[in-house]
Amino acid sequence: MTLGGVVIGILAGVVVSIFRYSIAAILHVFENYYIQARTDYWIAAVILLFLIIVGVIVGFMLKKEPNISGSGIPQVEAQLDGEMSVKWWAVLWRKFVGGILSIGPGLFLGREGPAIQLGASVGQGVGELTHLRSPVSKRIFIASGAAGGLAAAFNAPLAGCMFVLEEIYHNFSPMVWITALASAVSSNLIALYVFGLTPVLNIPYKFSLPINYYWHLVILGIILGLFGRLYQKVLLVMPSIYEKTKIPRSFQGLVPLVLLLPVGMMFPYFLGGGNGLIINLDHLHASFWILVGIFVLRFVFSMISYGSGLPGGIFLPILNLGAIIGAIYAVFMHQIGVLPLAYESNLIIFAMAGYFACISKAPFTAIILVTEMVGSLGHLMPLVVISLVAYIVVDILNGSPIYEALKEKLTLDDKYLNRVSKFSDRIEIPVFEGSSIDGKYIRDIAFPQEVLVIAIYRGERQLIPRGDTLVKSGDRIVMVVNAGLRSKLKRKLTQLINGID
């Protein structure tokens, strides 16, 4: 499996690096054209015509293959939960072309979600071409491909691996971990060869934040949590708003693409996912209200962009919005005399992690991702504090992980679930400290009738379960289930095994 992860990582690294390079090159060209369009209306007319043609082309792609819509992360989660089956080649090439056409001209969409789906498609393709029969092996290949995709998109192999385990696979199985890590490292090596060793977000900072200023992290974390919950609510309601336009879902991308022309002419350097804006944010020396204006622009148009269903992610736009909130907070606190402006870069870095942690509810990924993207280990403690505070705020406000919430809105194929239900599949769930089944015998646990417990891993040992086998915290219980019922049973089993007694 590890060798398979390496192969998948290399292939995913090549695909995603070309994808990433193409988007950056096209965006650079369009920035210049948007500036020229301010004084040359013929250029503006040509750009508008091109954007409409892009909307139509991508619309037909979406009509043919709806699973390339959005970031693709919810679709990958549904695949791994056994709720969806996709044709890897159809998704791979359409996501690749559709993503470049949608993100390249400057829509406020990220490359990372599509990169994850591209990597997952590569993993699925390798699994099918090598004739893997085990559903478990197929899922591990898909998950490792997703890790490789994120690693190549951000030069962040550890974050890519952690994101798959924490947000997509929801399982810290050693086999998954090692294969995903092999893929992420291999993919990242390809990306480093193409883009160099400079961190993706090379944000210089002069000083580490002193401990006596840590109270700012609590206040900023609360603010991030409140705006994070707002982000979740607005993003999830956008499809229903688009429905009122009466435009067919596949062609709703025409709305943001047409609006992109005036936005690009007015703000040519604020376009795209926002990577360049993050790096230069502290160099803008912008006033409080200008920063607020930038935030409103980025927030509103990113919602319009993603809500249309065009192929593109929210990963980088979320980090961008978090960075802007951090800059706004730093400037405001400096104006009222309670924080030196020298720490603006620090708060930009911290706020990115906090905002992503609370929206995705994946704090470990957020901390590792920002650490790798910035290229410094000097921020770990502040990143942990602000991520934890923001996470708690969203949790109190009943916010769900955004990708899980988006997955719930997918139209799943019930025929597929019924068709695969006759095939066996496997679920592995760890027993946490405080679990309701900790200290119970197997015979006393009310497992669903559709479940067969086949093994218990205790450290490096594998136990064959019997009625008098005692379950302990730290164990990993392996069960066989019907493939079509996997997602439903996994939720039941997770509640049964890890519910607090």
Image (spheres, rainbow, N blue to C red):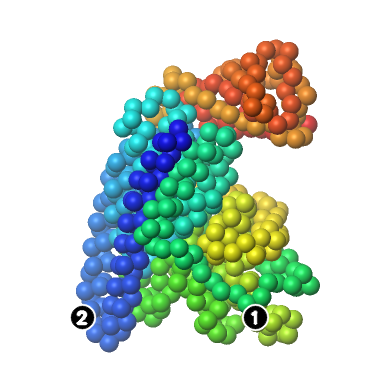
Q: Quadrant of residue 330?
A: bottom right
Query: Along the line of sight, which residue is nearer the eye, 121 or 290?
Result: 121
Q: Residue 342 carries which label?
A: 1
Q: In this view, does 428 lie above or below 285?
A: above
| Amino acid residing under circle 1 | Ala
Residue 413 image point, x, y percent: 40, 34
Disc 2 packing (10 Å; few <14; some 14–19; many ≥20):
few
Q: Residue at x 70, y 72 (%)?
A: 209
Q: Which residue is drawn at 43% across and 47% down?
A: 186
Residue 12 image point, x, y percent: 37, 47
Residue 362 shown left or right of residue 41 in the figure: right
Q: In this view, does 354 lie above or below 13?
A: below
| Amino acid residing under circle 2 | Trp
- Quarter of the picture containing the N terminus is top left
- Quarter of the picture containing the C terminus is top right
For mark 2, what is the residue?
Answer: 42
Residue 20 image point, x, y percent: 36, 59
